[in-house]
Image: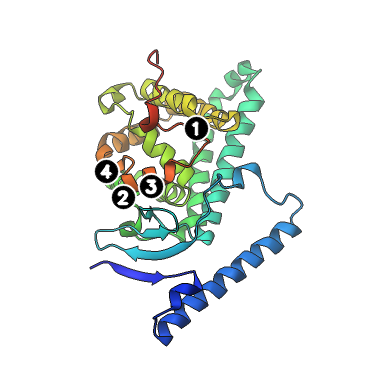
Amino acid sequence: MTDSIYGLVDSKLTEGLNEQQKSAVLNWEAYSQFQAAMAEIIQNMKEIPILPSEIPPEGDKHSLTKVELPPEGGVLSFMEHFEHPYRGFPYLEFVDKTDIIKKLVKGSLSGIYHSFRAKWIKILFILPAILVFRELIWTGIYTFYRLIERYRIKPLRYSKAIRALHEAFSVPRGDSFKEMELRYMIRDILCMILEFDNAYRFRAQDILAELNQKALKNPIKELHRIIDIASIREKTQMTKDTWKLIKMFVSFYLRFDHKFKNMVIHVLKNLNLEEFKLTAEDIAFCDPRKDYTFGYKNNVVNKSL
């Protein structure tokens, strides 16, 4: 039986409820109003109140009416004006922690890209430092893991797609203890980011539907192909640039860190693409987005790729 956490929001919903139920609804409304007031105060205190990337798409704000914990897993959040529930529960504290990681990763990749964009000859001088670079990457992963470790959610409560990703990362592959530990850390970091940022999650679900698992014999070529498709589907140059940074990382790092590359191949080959794909519930929340052209809408794929 599905556990229903609460039905909320509009005070009209208190009609016909007993005193305990009314108290729960009104307490939630008071808490929501307090959080909204705190957010407004903080925005007014900040030198840069809000970044463009932090502005939700038009029509993306809807009142929460009910939350359920299905026995098969996940969390279903029911919202006003949506026939289908949202798969997940974007709790602010979790979102903030994962947002820090996203900004650090993107900033680091951007810094490297702009440093060497017009000076590729300098790369020749850093080739002897490749092993040091790998250690820096691994150190970054350990650091990011510490940020989210306390906030990890139970694998059962991830949305359907992220449970599939978690399972793919968890398939044994005979690696050393250190490599296994690193793989699990990457798993938890990625799962948390994708679970609590639907812009990233929906894009990942959309683009991995294009993945040809048999083509992973040449993983860099196949990853380049789907990254290029993702970039074509983007509608803003800022996000296209993000995919360019990801492609740069794939081109450079996977060519010399074979252990990392083999882990990526292992995960992608074991990923259940049927479980990972967009569901009817996901599509209901993808439809209002205007920053990306999802493949299910018109199957935008550059045939020449």
Crowding around mark 4 (Cα neighbors within 10 Å: few <14, some 14 to 19, many 20+) is some
Q: Secondary structure at mark 3?
A: helix
Q: Give the residue pinned by disc 3.
A: 187
N-terminal of the pair, mark 3 or mark 2, is 2
The quarter holding residue 219 reads top left
Q: Which mark is residue 160?
A: 2
Q: Give the residue pinned by disc 1.
A: 131
Q: How many marks?
A: 4
85 shown above or below 265: below
**Residue 175, image x and y in percent?**
30, 41
Determine the CA span between mark 3 and mark 1: 23 Å
Instruction: Indicate left or right for 111 with 198 as reference.
Output: right
* Residue 177 seen in this snapshot: no
N-terminal of the pair, mark 3 or mark 1, is 1
Determine the CA span between mark 1 and mark 2: 37 Å
113 shown above or below 104: above
Q: Secondary structure at mark 1?
A: helix
